[in-house]
Image: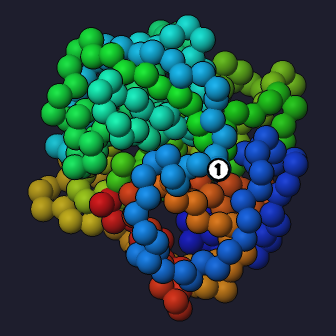
Amino acid sequence: MSVPCLLSRAARSFTLLGASGVLLHRFRVLCPCSITRKMSSRRQMDHLERTASNYRQDGVYPAQVCGIMDESETVKRLRLAVHPDFTFRAGQWVDFFIPGMEKVGGFSVCSSPGLLQKEGVIELAVKYTQHPPAHWIHTKCTMDSHVAMRVGGNFFFDPLPSDPSVDLLLVAGGVGINPLYSILLHAADLLRQNPTNAGRGYHIGSTHLCYSAKNTQELLFKKSIINVCKEFPEKFSCDFHITAQTADIDQELQPYMNRKYHRMTLTQSQMFTDIVYNGSVYFGFQNIYILTGYASIGCKTDTFSMILNGC
């Protein structure tokens, strides 16, 4: 079934889930609001301000940079060795404390909880900006740099064995892929741990990723995403979208490219939950969850446009 058909079908059968939803049952349900509000009218807030009401762990843990690589021309990927007591759930973010810097960064974890369990490390993918923490990562951070982190975030994917199965539709733009990539990896890890689901543990539903960026070079983690789709072709699939490609597309990527632009009408979107200003939007349906991470979001008064512009 195509993505537009899936969205339309889900919209007709919409029911906001409460205590029983896998993705919503351990935190408050997001309150409905008007989907037509102007996103540009909101004043810029720093990470601590816009997440002030979000859940945070009590502990602030030391961490040491043990790996740095260029994920793209604009994004650096950090690997950090963390304290043994450090924990997080797929989809959560960290407060990022840099010695000598007053401003606190906020970055979604892009690695899976499984990597933390196996190697004691987490990964962050940070886009270059003039924001002091991001600028420090791109210009001053080195191997063995010391920082501190605190985990936060009301939203995560961490199903219990008794939870009902759900299908996941992940919609990401640009660096907004980070929390959704963590969720995709965690879902794949759960499937590897229990491939048959023979009455022992959570039953993994299907996962589809729609991911847009400026060009294929800015499609972060694309090789890993494709590898997961190849490993579990009946459970995982993806569509890549690009908005300003100038070079030829690699042959390996061509089967996964989709240049169509889809819209949902305001009528279809009026039942959606609140837009949360932490880089992500979360929509809930009866047994389908649409989880979106955007670098920016565009809304119009006559239609809700899924604008994946990879800013």
- Among the 4 quarters of the image, the one containing residue 268: bottom right
Foreground residue among 196 and 181:
181
Quadrant of the snapshot with the C terminus = bottom left
Residue 187 seen: no
Colour scheme: rainbow
Q: Is residue 265 above or below residue 16?
A: below
Residue 73 appears in view: yes
- Image coordinates of residue 125 in percent, x first then y, are 35, 36
Residue depicted at 61% across the width and 41% down the height: 153
The relative height of residue 274 versus residue 149 in the rendered view (above or below) is below
The x and y percentages for residue 24 are 76, 48
Provide residue 77's location: percent of width, then percent of height. 30, 31
* Residue placed furthest toward the left: 247
Q: Secondary structure at mark 1?
A: loop
Q: Is residue 23 left or right of residue 144?
A: right
Q: 107 or 268: which is nearer to us?
A: 107
Q: Is residue 56 left or right of residue 301?
A: right
Q: Would you say 101 lies left or right of 301 here?
A: left
Q: Position of residue 301 (x, y in %)?
A: 52, 89
Residue at the location (12% across, 62% down)? Answer: 246
Residue that label 1 marks:
53
Front residue (pair 133, 110): 133
Residue at 48 percent across and 80 percent down: it is 38
Quadrant assignment, res 1: bottom right
Count of numbered labels shown in the rendering: 1
**Residue at 60 percent of width and 22 percent of height:** 59
